[in-house]
Image (cartoon, rainbow, N blue to C red):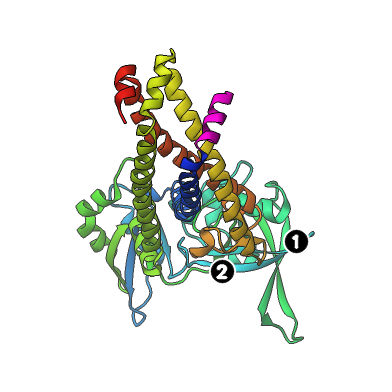
Amino acid sequence: MNTFVLKSLWNRRKQYVWLFAELVVITIVSWIVFDPAVIILYNAHQPMGYDVEQLCYGELRVSYDEEKDDPDILRARLTTIDGIEDVYTCDMYSYISPVSYTDLKAITDNDTCHVPSFRYNSSSHFFETYGIKPLPGSPSAKELSRLNPADNQVVLTRNAAIYLFGTTDVIGRSFIQLNEGHFNSSSQPKNIRLTVVGVVENIRHPENSVVFRPQKRLSPQNVVFRLRKGLTPSTFLEEHQDEIFQKGNGTSFQMYKVMPLDQYDYQQQLKRGRPQKANKNLAMALFFMISLCLGVVGTMWLQSKKRTEECGVMRAYGASRFRIMLNFLTEGWVLVTIAVLIGCVLYFQYIYSGITYVTYGKDVHIFSEFLYDRLVPTKADMTWMDELWPHFLVISAIVYLIILLTVSIGIAIPAWNICRKKPVEALREE
């Protein structure tokens, strides 16, 4: 950057003071608007950790007056349908969903910590149906699905293993589950020692750190089934719905609803208001983006047009079109950089004033998934959006780039049009 740009900015400081103040305010408002939009889009593109694209969900009406059918019979019937590879029969809360998790207080050799716990039906096809992959060295998905609940064995996700033990090499190690709500005759908490028998890849619904525990199979109320690769759940269900209903009926249950699993998850999220909040934030960000472009581009356009005579003088003294436009752009970039820096510093004061400490540092003035049914993340699960400085720097960089782009457009187009004029024409224009 040459001294000409700095001198030009200083000489035009009175004309730029209101523009500078406007950019500072825009920076603060941009932070408020774009923060939730960036986090929502970031989370939406994170991998689920299981093959949700190939999974369908079914609900059963259960009659407890009749003799119960063996869940394996239901599975055998459904797997005769061409296209269905595997079936997991489950009760009300033993399928993966945001409400299926409970908090487990774990006591390891080094620390006492909390981690989400999920119970799945034993002697089932849970891991195979969902497509959750074991890490190398762990038992197969089939073996993990058939653990005996009486043996107090558990399966950890990768992040849960790192959180509890600091490594994924944890097979055979154990920790204590503290059941604070259950008491024995001595009125002391009843502790259970759990042994790790397998480690699987992370899942993202709602946490990565999860302890999977087998439970005794109950009468099935829901069914999750996996389709063959290449099949589209919505199309498959349209073509085979009657056959699924027919083979999904038994003496004590009747299948009455089927849909793609991701559609069912979305319906559950609608009941909790999450998609509405996300759509509201995204719509606000889009509206603000359009307004920002129109407002900033329009303002910079007028500022550039006022310098037509100046451009003519520079052309008359031999300055090239490229050099003139580059000078105009550099002035705008310097102005934006200083304004965004000040705006972000001012907003950081507001952010810092709202910090409270729960389990880890949580900032009530920074948008995060804490607002959306997310349990307090374990240290292994924490990403840039859960940490104050990384979160602040990432969003600030995005805000800076957006404002820089809009200002550049607002300067470049009129500056180029002005530079194309002959010096005589530019000098005549007021």
The quadrant of the image that shows the C terminus is top left
Task: Say if residue 120 shows up in the picture.
Answer: no
Q: Amino acid at mark 2?
A: Thr
Relative image position of residue 166 (x, y in whole percent): 72, 50
Name the residue that disc number 1 marks. 108
- C-alpha separation, residue under disc 1 versus residue under disc 2: 18 Å
Q: Residues within 10 Å of mark 2 (few under 14, many from 20)?
A: some
Residue 181 within the segment the image draws in magenta: no
Q: Amino acid at mark 1?
A: Thr
Q: In the current view of this chain or complex, which residue is farthest to the top?
A: 318
Q: Main secondary structure of the magenta part?
A: helix
Q: Quick check: 279 left or right of 354?
A: left
Q: For residue 195, which quarter of the picture?
A: bottom right
Depth order, front residue of 211/318 = 318
Residue in the picture at 56% in, 69% down: 102
The quadrant of the image that shows the N terminus is top right
Depth order, front residue of 348/169 = 348
Q: How many marks?
A: 2
Q: For residue 65, which quarter of the picture?
A: bottom left
Give the residues in magenta: 1-12
Q: Could you say which disc has been placed on residue 102 in the image? A: 2
- Numbered disc 2: secondary structure: strand
- Numbered disc 1: secondary structure: loop
Residue 183 vertical placement versus 150 (above, below) = below
Q: In the current view of this chain or complex, which residue is farthest to the right?
A: 110
Residue in the picture at 38% in, 33% down: 304
Relative image position of residue 282 (x, y in whole percent): 38, 54
Q: Earlier in the sequence, mark 1 or mark 2?
A: 2
Residue 275 vertical placement versus 24 (above, below) = below
Relative image position of residue 253 (x, y in whole percent): 32, 72
